[in-house]
Image: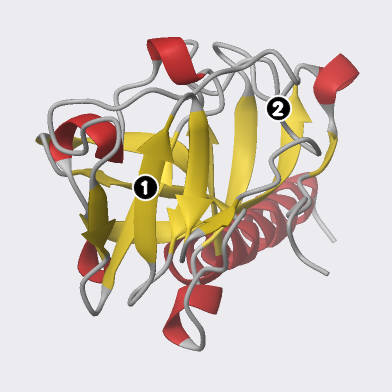
Amino acid sequence: MSIFRKIYLFLVDTVQSLLIAASFFLIIYIFIARPFQVSGDSMYPNFQNNEYVLTNIISLKFNGPQRGDVVVFKAPPEPDKDFIKRVIGLPGDTVMIKDGDVYINNQLLDESSFLKSDVKTFGGDFLADGQTITVPVDEYFVMGDNRPYSSDSRSWGFVPKDNLIGYSFFAYWPPSEAGLIKNPLKQ
């Protein structure tokens, strides 16, 4: 076999391998999981600015998010931007913020598993302190973990289900922060 034929066969095999790898990547990226970068400090200290997370986009097709899940979504105030926040209120829930605490369905929400005890939550333009709202069907109430510095549902309202992109399930960059993202409120 001539050297040119060997080079040709090697190049064909290489191109085929690259096309197969690219096809797998595209299928995973479009249908299963997608990387997102955390921008800003609204989820600090649980997520850092410029941290990268993998977001499962297929699960939303089968079941909605649960309270405590970290989700990526098209931001209602800026639909061209993706936000990452924690789900606090589910469809049908009543949400109230009073004296620095969050109440869901008239029960104090225990956030000690993901917030420090000195973190206080105060109302915003959409949900004022002491006011109670009911989360509509197919919408969610979300908040950042860094409550004083988070633009979230307290300011601009509910997140429609259609805006949800997926659940964040794995932090992978920087390596020192790598690990599974668990829902601290799931029992």
Point 74% across, 34% down: residue: 114
Closer to the camera in the image, 67 or 108: 108
Closer to the camera in the image, 1 or 81: 81
Choose top left, top right, bottom left or bottom right for residue 160: bottom left
Q: Is residue 39 visible in the rendered structure shown here?
A: no
Cα–Cα span, label 1 and label 2? 18 Å
Q: Position of residue 178 (x, y in %)?
A: 84, 30
Tell me the element at label 1. Answer: strand
Q: Provide the residue designation for mark 1.
A: 96
Question: Answer yes or no: do the residues labelled 1 and 2 have beta carbons within 8 Å?
Answer: no
Q: Quadrant of the C terminus?
A: bottom right
Q: Is residue 71 above or below residue 171?
A: below
Tell me the element at label 2. Answer: loop
Q: Image check: 123 left or right of 113?
A: left
Q: Image check: 3 left or right of 54?
A: right
Indicate which label's residue lies in the foreground, 1 or 2. 1
Task: Rate crowding at label 1 as few (under 14), some (14 to 19) or many (20 or more) other CA atoms within 10 Å.
Answer: many
Q: Quadrant of the N terminus?
A: bottom right
Disc assigned to residue 115: 2
Q: Position of residue 80 (x, y in %)?
A: 14, 36
Q: Is residue 171 above or below residue 166?
A: above
Disc assigned to residue 23: none
Q: Image check: 148 left or right of 133?
A: right
Point 37% across, 54% down: residue: 95
Q: Residue type at mark 1?
A: Met
Q: Is residue 92 above or below residue 85?
A: below
Q: Position of residue 33 (x, y in %)?
A: 57, 59
Closer to the camera in the image, 8 or 31: 31
Point 77% across, 50% down: residue: 184
Q: Is residue 9 visible in the rendered structure shown here?
A: yes
Task: Rate crowding at label 2 as few (under 14), some (14 to 19) or many (20 or more) other CA atoms within 10 Å.
Answer: some
